Image (cartoon, grey):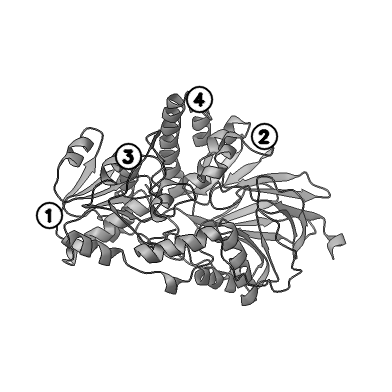
Amino acid sequence: MGSKERHFAYITALNPEVTGSALPVSVTTSSVRKCNFLVDCGLFQEREYNYLNQNGFPFSCEKIEFVLITHNHADHVGKLPLLCKNGFYGKIFATKATAKLMKISLSNSYQIMKEEAQRWKQKPLYDEEDLERVFECIEPCEIGESIQVNQNVKVTFFDNGHIVGASMILTQLSYPGEKDINILFTGDYKPYNTFKEVKEMPTWVYGLPMNVVIESTYGDTETSEIEYNFERDVEKLLKERKSLFIPVLAQGRAQEILYTLKKMQEDGRINENIPIYLDGDLSHQYTYMYRSKLLDIDEEKLDFLPKNFHWVNKDNRVGIMMTNTQKIILTTSGMLDHGPAQLYLPTVITRKNWVIYLTSYCSEGTLGRKLMDNVDEESVMVMGMELKLKIKAQIFSTSQFSSHAKANELIALLSKFKNLKLVLINHGEKETKEKFASRVEDAEVAERVEILGQHTFKVASYGYMKAMGAKLYSNTKTRKNTNSKKVKKLKKVSKTRTERKKVACKRKISHPR
């Protein structure tokens, strides 16, 4: 069968674990020129992989014909200016909402990068001209619209509940006399969203011979394991006269928390007189955008600001912190490694009347993860300085706001396909990807299951052909070739995860992701 095939797709993941999402795809044929494209182009946020942001790309950027963007998060779009700097001149396809939001996020990232480069006396990764070139390359797309990006490649964007504007992207590779190669890139996936109705993919998609590249951030977690504890905790803590410091992601998480607090006010669960503050230029811009009618947001959800809400900037920030009155502060970043959160921490973290309530996934090595793990005896970086901070504030966390699907929801998505050839697992911590691979194989929803980040995979119309040796950025161990046999379930967990669970049990917290 393989000898008759004359066109193939080679798929690689540049991200060893969660962040830094970038999937180079190369299509080769016997009679037509090679086509190279990229799905997402993100920054690494794990400390151990930060050097990869400086290293550019392990491929020739000028040979990339186009880029497909699943959604507007820095770990999926943050390296686009660097791609342009290194010779990319093609189009960048994204949904209309993502296209609008990208201009905000990338402009903000550029300003932060410039300031940090000046602070550390380093050369910026890219300049304003590279940023402007990204904006010139963006091609906004309608949800559900099929776009013929070249003679042989058609792409269709489908709804995804991860954040507003997020999409799954179907690529169909068609060549004369050959069967199509269909590849669905889920991006970061969630079947529902607080601010909009998530439309189901049409039935014809599920009937195609399909290869799926799927995320696995929560691939070791069931929806039944998620404790919806935020409202309960907030209600209790505020009655105890605690002030709340809530690190948030600028897009999605900040707006969802504000919406939740408003509903709690309306239900009489929290006092409307307690002031609620939002800090961070980027979170402000996204909140303005969410309240406008420029995005695909349900009209009844546009008015989501709670009573006694206040915008915070550099002029009133100090005054807010100096007052001893009870308050709620939302600010970026969600992992506590940058943004206005760093300005508050030296005060908040050392006071018993404060609670730091973590609502986002925090990568290994970040200050947010250290607080979850109760690492209070070692030095931490705050505002570019190494400080020893004795934790007196209480640390709480929740996973209920996660914008990622859990294992059972991911399996449910895969189960809808009638002819699923290959599942490639991406975007997850190493052990989580392994566990999710076992889950997918046990569910028997696909002919073949493999893990990206370990090899380059050669795919034909009938699915998996072989795994190539190149590992690019990956430093993880190679998963054994199972030849479609069941993978033995992992019985052990990593030392760090075990330690985290002990800490979580001791302090009654859980890790949000």
Residue at which label 2 appears? 62
Report how far apart the C-alphas of labels 2 and 4 lie in the structure.
26 Å
Report how far apart the C-alphas of labels 2 and 3 lie in the structure.
37 Å
Secondary element at image label 3 = loop
Location of residue 105 in the rendering, given as x and y in whole percent from the top left corner = 42, 41
Report how far apart the C-alphas of labels 2 and 1 lie in the structure.
56 Å
Select label 1 or label 3 by which is in front.
3
Q: Is residue 225 left or right of residue 286?
A: right
Report how far apart the C-alphas of labels 4 and 3 lie in the structure.
22 Å
In the rendered structure, which amino acid carries the disc numbered 4?
Gln
In the rendered structure, which amino acid carries the disc numbered 3?
Pro
Label number found at residue 340: 3
The mark total stands at 4
Residue at which label 4 appears? 122
Q: Nearer the viewer, residue 184 or 405?
A: 405
Residue 333 in view (yes/no): yes
Select label 2 or label 4 by which is in front.
4
Q: Which of marks 3 and 2 precedes in the sequence?
A: 2
Q: Are marks 1 and 3 in contact (CB under 8 Å)?
A: no
Crowd rating for badge 4 (residues with CA inside 10 Å; few <14, some 14–19, many 20+): few
Select label 4 or label 1 by which is in front.
4
Location of residue 85 in the rendering, given as x and y in whole percent from the top left corner = 58, 30
Q: Are marks 2 and 3 in contact (CB under 8 Å)?
A: no
